[in-house]
Structure formats: C-alpha cells, structure tokens
Amino acid sequence: MEKKQQYFDRVVKLAKEYPKVLVVEADNVGSHNLQKIRKSLLGEAVVLMGKNTMIRRALRAHSAENPAIGNLIPLLKGNVGLVFTKGDLGSVRAKLLALKVAAPAKAGAVAPVNVTVPAGNTGMEPTKTSFLQALNIPSKINKGQVEIVSDVLLIKVGQKVGSSEATLLQMLNIKPFFYGLKVRSVYDHGSIYAAEILDITDDDILAHFSAGLARVASLALAIHLPTVASFPHIVINAYKNLVAVAIATEISFKQVDKLKEMIKNPAAFAVAAPAPAAAAAAPKAEAKKEEVKEEEPEEDMGFSLFD
C-alpha cells in the first residue's frame, strides 16, 4: 500500500512539474532497453511506466487542480507509458526513435516490416535443404553447405510470424525487427495532437502561410477589396498606372522624371560597352623562306683538261 501511495504521489508531482508529455507505446521493449532509454534522457525527460489504472487515478485526482491534464486519461490504453519533459518535444522524440534495439522474430508476433532472407551461403548442413524447400526458398549445395540462390521475401509487413519462419531466422542469426518506445500522442500545455505534427518544421509553416497569404491577396484584388495582404499590390498597381499616364502625357512628377528622360534620350543613359578583348595575336610562326643561293661561276685556273 505504501508503494502504491509513493507511485501515486510521483505521478502527481510529475504532472505538476512538467507541462509537456509524450504518450508512448512500449510493445516488445525489454527492461534492459528501457533502462538505456532512461539513461539517455537523463536531465532532459523522465520516463514513467506502470499500470494504467494507477496513472489514470493519479491524473484524475490532479485534474481538480489542472483540468487540462484530464485530456491524457483517454489515451492511457494498452501497453503505454508517459515521457515528461520541459524541453523540445521534437528533440526528445528523435532520441526515442534512435534508441531502438534489434530483436528476433518470435512466433505469433506481427511483423512491423517486410522480412527478406538474403541470397548466399547459410553455413547450414545439406540436411537442412528440405526445411528450406518447405518454405519455398530455392537453395543448392555448395562446398558441403546450403546456399540460398536468390533473395526471398519471407514475411510481409502486418503478417504474423509462423513458427517455421521464426526458426529459420534464428538459424540464420537474423534479427529483422527493431523495437523501442514509439510516440503515439503528444500533450503540450493542455493540447493533445498526433505525433506526426512534430515532423512539421518552421519552413513548412512559413511555406503554408505564404501560400495562404498569396491566395488572400489574389482574391482581394479580384473583388477590389482592400486588405492588409492586397494593399501593397494595390499601391504598386496604382503607381504603374500613374507612370503610364505621365509617359503618355505632359504630366510629370519627381518619381517619373528620370524615366521620361531615359525614354527621350536613351543614349545619355547608355552604359559604355566594355572594350572587346584584344584579338589573339596571329601566330608568329611563318614559313621559312628558302634562301636561294646563286651559283658562283667557276674560276678559270689557266689550263684545260685536254691541254
């Protein structure tokens, strides 16, 4: 009885101290993994597990002081726990998602993901080929060991794990599932919303706001209704109309004088074009002129060959 009272007081104390709570599912989460999660969140959040009836009773008692906390009571169904925090909910959720451990596929469990047996050497004896054939897994004997010929989808997501599938995965030392605390709902200063809301970033909010603002401005302009969203466009459009009238007539005002001068004398405002790049120098290599050597006349030596 004393332990129950201590637990009751602890739940009330946490509800008073922390304005934000994550409702988490704890299916297939072992005590060892839960201890690792508590250590990882130390100083940032507090993980509370226990009987739903006790937690409901404590929250119901505290709801007299804080009626909004009563919104948590309908969410306490199944194997759930509460994560109390004062910090950023998105950061705490990210840590919870990261703290998952690999687990074997147990017979009767519902597969949260598809399970594929990869091709390759299994290390099993040739006597196990009949076991694989029963599961429609193509195999062959290679160097005295069973080898799976190709990848095989063994279990589909949402399907219950059979005893044969569980045995095979255990023989192959495959742990296909990862379990951890999964955030189901969020309590934030009295408001309850789905965990998916935490995936929305500031950029997403800004993009949606900008798109909505553009629609409001378009509608207001179409029906000629001045609003905060459409007023800047109204001013700009009016300025454009004034400029068009001033250009077409002799009317002039300060903001349009320079534009009219540019139209009358565009050459005065033309920016000098940059000097063209110097043409590449022609190759200096020239064909060498053959030097024509004039043949010198032979000198008369004063005698003849037939002399």
Image: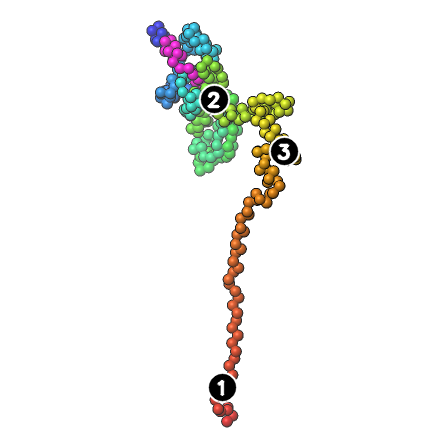
Q: Tell me if mark 3 has few (under 14), some (14-19) or many (20+) residues whose alpha carbon lies within 10 angstroms of its own.
A: few
Residue shown at 49%/17% (left/top)?
193
Report x, y in % for residue 250. Answer: 64, 35
| Crowdedness near tag 1: few (<14), some (14–19) or many (≥20) residues, C-alpha within 10 Å | few
Q: Label 3 amino acid?
A: Ile
Give the quadrant of residue 90: top left
Could you tell me if the residues under marks 3 and 1 are in contact, i.e. CB atoms within 8 Å?
no
Q: Amino acid at mark 1?
A: Glu
Mark 2 or mark 3, which is nearer to you?
3
In the rendering, at what x and y percent does residue 172 appear? Answer: 44, 29
Provide the residue span drawn in magenta. 8-27
Marks 3 and 1, Cα distance to the nearest angstrom?
102 Å
Residue 46 inside the magenta-drawn segment: no
Task: Read off the residue under disc 3.
Answer: 251
The residue depicted at 57 percent of the width and 43 percent of the height is: 269
Measured from the top left, where is residue 8 in percent x and y? 38, 8
Q: Secondary structure at mark 1?
A: loop
Residue at image mark 1: 299
Q: Earlier in the sequence, mark 3 or mark 1?
A: 3
Pointer 2 or 3: first along the chain = 2
The residue where tag 2 is placed is 198
Q: Quadrant of residue 69?
A: top left
The alpha-carbon separation of the residues under discs 1 and 2 comes to 113 Å
Q: Nearer the viewer, mark 1 or mark 2?
A: 1
- Mark 2 nearby-residue class (10 Å; few <14, some 14–19, many ≥20): some
Q: Quadrant of residue 122?
A: top left
Instruction: Identify the mark nearer the N-term, 1 or 2.
Output: 2
| SS category of the residue bearing label 2 | helix
| Residue located at (62% from left, 24% from top) | 221
SS at circle 3: loop
